[in-house]
Amino acid sequence: MATYAIGIDLGTTNSVIAYTRLDQDAAQPQVLSVPQLVAPATVESRFQLPSFLYLSSEQEADTGNYDLPWQPGGKDAVGELALQQAAAMPMRTVAAAKSWLCYSRVDRHQPLLPWGAPSEVPKVSPVDVSRRYLAHLVAAWHHEFPAAPITEQRVVLTVPASFDASARELTREAALAAGLPADLILLEEPQAALYAWLADSGEQWRRHLSVGDTLLVCDVGGGTTDFTLIGVDEIDGALELQRMAVGTHTLVGGDNMDVALAHFASTAFADKGLRLDAWQSVSLWHACRAAKEALLALEGPKTYPVTVLGRGRRLVGGTVSVDLQREAVQALLLDGFFPVCKVDDRPERRRASGFRELGLPYESDVAVTRHLAYFLSLHGADAHSARVTHVLFNGGVFKAPLFRDRLMDILVQWYGKKAQPQVLAGVADLDYAVARGAAYYGFAKAGRGIRIRGGTARSYYVGIETAGLAIPGAPRPLKALCVVPFGMEEGTEVRVPSAAIGLVVGEPCLFRFFSSAVRKDDQPGDVLEHWSDEELSETDPLATTLPVEQATEEDYVPVQFESRLTELGVFELWCVNTMSDQRWKLEFSVREDAEEVPDPQEK
């Protein structure tokens, strides 16, 4: 029987592990201090594990500089030392691995990272990098609690609310390979942030929220921006929290600010006659991270130096520095990422060229405020309809008060002073909120805490190839058949009404799936013949061969669909033969309680 509920925040920039005992009357989440390398051959414990991996050279591998208490003879570094090496040796340092997990245009099992590194640098896959971060946290847990194996605890691992089913499964795959238990729970990060607020508020939370309120969780972290709407309902005389909507995956966050600051700093280097090459530019990007955090702090310095190693004939082995001014940096980041805008403004979708590298698909418009305006308009919470009544901030970016203040000022402009939203304050520390909230959720799973309900956050569809005359060189058009409606609850099932569909069996085939966070009225059996990219997004296809029991003259059999959402939050799509008792199952996870990997099978 589990002794602890453990929450793990696998962050883009930092990872955190928290825990609470399950034999207490109330959850008391605490953050675990994680031993890590902070300098060569120097191990210290920190409450955050920077999500960076440094891949050492052959000359460094046997020096003993990368030994850990549980791993003598280590060859690479995870954590603080790797973060430092990101500025000194950027081509050997992996960053933003989490953002790669949800990028479906590359094979995330292939060694891709560090992206753009020279051929002599060993590469690792996004899945393996995530495994290494989690394995370090698992080892730190066993180092502190050797009598409480993590596989015997209740573990909750957080993911962005915008992660699709494929990204969730890849995260789960990395977690299992790192030694986490097979029954681990995946929880959306904005929900985890709200659970942290609930843990800190106790029973007092009902004094802050009332029936009919709409809470916006605004989560801007190192690599992504996530928006979630949560409503307050009354069921059987008690207040309940109901998730209403989640946003799309938006690659805007603290990393983008670091790049913007590096671009700003590069002009100062140019004034000194130093034109940065590609290697120095990456180094400067990482160096600007520390400058940003210092200059945005409440009592930060008026100036902060950033330094790059010299590369010219006169500067090899030397360094060049420039001082960044606090006021200039704050104005640059505030107006660039949180500009004043109207509620009907939309993110710009500009392209510099018809060609682009296959790197991460960062947003061309980094204005968080315009992305928020668009999100609220999609989900009926802008000034023209329902409105946000409360805001909960999460993510490292909002540690800076000027960003929180600017966003609240903009909401007042949108809604008016009489209807301005209230900030839910009281979360102890934004750096640890997600991990602490995940631990609280693990505690609440035992029925002793508040839970957020809402079923699926998206509608799900299958792609159906249309019949008709073939056109040379052109694929047949697809229709999208709704098989899971928005908000479908766990433990329910539905027979999808439709004409018989031809299911290809006995040969390799690609099954295509789509999802939508905005089409909330579609019902099972609804067919879409046309849709925009904003309405439907395609998840990773499922390639498999479905067996057939008996010989058939056709390469397909007529089926209809049955959809089930198990108590564990696993979506099962059953293909039922309309002419026999034969059935096939396709499944993938769609919610935070996923406990199975895709495993097509016949029954």
Image (cartoon, rainbow, N blue to C red):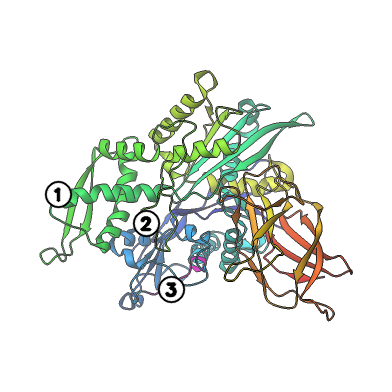
Magenta stretch contains residue 125? yes
Circles 1 and 3: CB distance less than 8 Å? no
Q: Nearer the viewer, residue 170 or 207?
A: 170
Q: Is residue 154 visible?
A: no
Quadrant (top left/top right/bottom left/bottom right) for the N terminus: bottom right
Between discs 1 and 2, the one toward the N terminus: 1
> Please, what is the three-letter code of the amino acid marked with disc 3?
Pro
Magenta stretch contains residue 323? no
What residue would you read off at disc 2? 353
The residue shown at (34%, 49%) is 258
- Mark 2 closeness class: few <14, some 14–19, many ≥20 residues within 10 Å: few
The residue shown at (64%, 53%) is 515
What residue would you read off at disc 1? 271
Judge depth for marks 1 and 3 and give the one in front.
1
Circles 2 and 3: CB distance less than 8 Å? no
Judge depth for marks 1 and 2 and give the one in front.
2
Judge depth for marks 2 and 3 and give the one in front.
2
What label sits on residue 72 in the rendered view?
Answer: 3
> Please, what is the three-letter code of the amino acid marked with disc 2?
Ser
Residue most extreme to the bottom: 551
The residue shown at (33%, 72%) is 118
| 500 sits to left or right of 446 | right
Between discs 2 and 3, the one toward the N terminus: 3
Counting labels gives 3
> Magenta residues, as a range?
122-128
The residue shown at (49%, 58%) is 98
Circles 1 and 2: CB distance less than 8 Å? no
Q: Position of residue 10 (x, y in %)?
A: 52, 55
User: Element under label 3?
Assistant: loop
Quadrant (top left/top right/bottom left/bottom right) for the C terminus: bottom right
